Image (cartoon, rainbow, N blue to C red):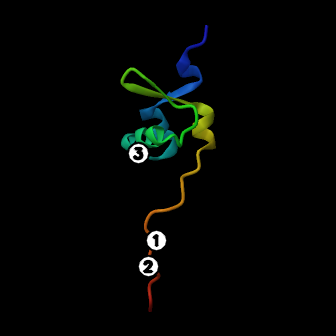
Amino acid sequence: MSSVLDTHYTVQRAAEVLGLSDYRVAELCRQGLLEGAEKVGCSWVIPRRAVAAFRPPRGGRRRKKSVE
């Protein structure tokens, strides 16, 4: 008999795999950017395939090019 944790990660484990904070992974779940993530009680379960396929969205601040 297989457990849900055989095919899914917790937020903490997904954060370790992705190199992100727990808060950021939970935010990605809330935004629907980790496909198939589901809230179970107070916790998120995230399919391993979604973590493997995740590519961070482009955006945020752009670095200024240094002028020498």
Q: Are marks 1 and 2 in contact (CB under 8 Å)?
A: yes
Q: With respect to residue 67, does 19 lie above or below?
A: above
Who is closer to the viewer here, 35 or 24?
A: 35
Instruction: Tell me which numbered mark, 1 or 3, is placed earlier along the sequence.
Output: 3
- Disc 1 element: loop
Image quadrant in which you'd find residue 3: top right
Q: How many marks on residues?
A: 3
The residue that label 3 is drawn on is 24
Image quadrant in which you'd find residue 50: top right
User: Which x, y percent locates residue 66?
Assistant: 44, 84
- Quadrant for the N terminus, please: top right
C-alpha distance separating marks 1 and 2 = 6 Å
Residue 64: mark: 2
* Residue depicted at 53% across the width and 43% down the height: 33
Mark 3 crowdedness (10 Å alpha carbons): few <14, some 14-19, many ≥20? few
The residue that label 1 is drawn on is 62
* Residue depicted at 46% across the width and 71% down the height: 62
Residue lying furthest top: 1
Residue 28: mark: none
* Residue depicted at 55% across the width and 26% down the height: 8
User: Which x, y percent locates residue 19?
Assistant: 47, 47
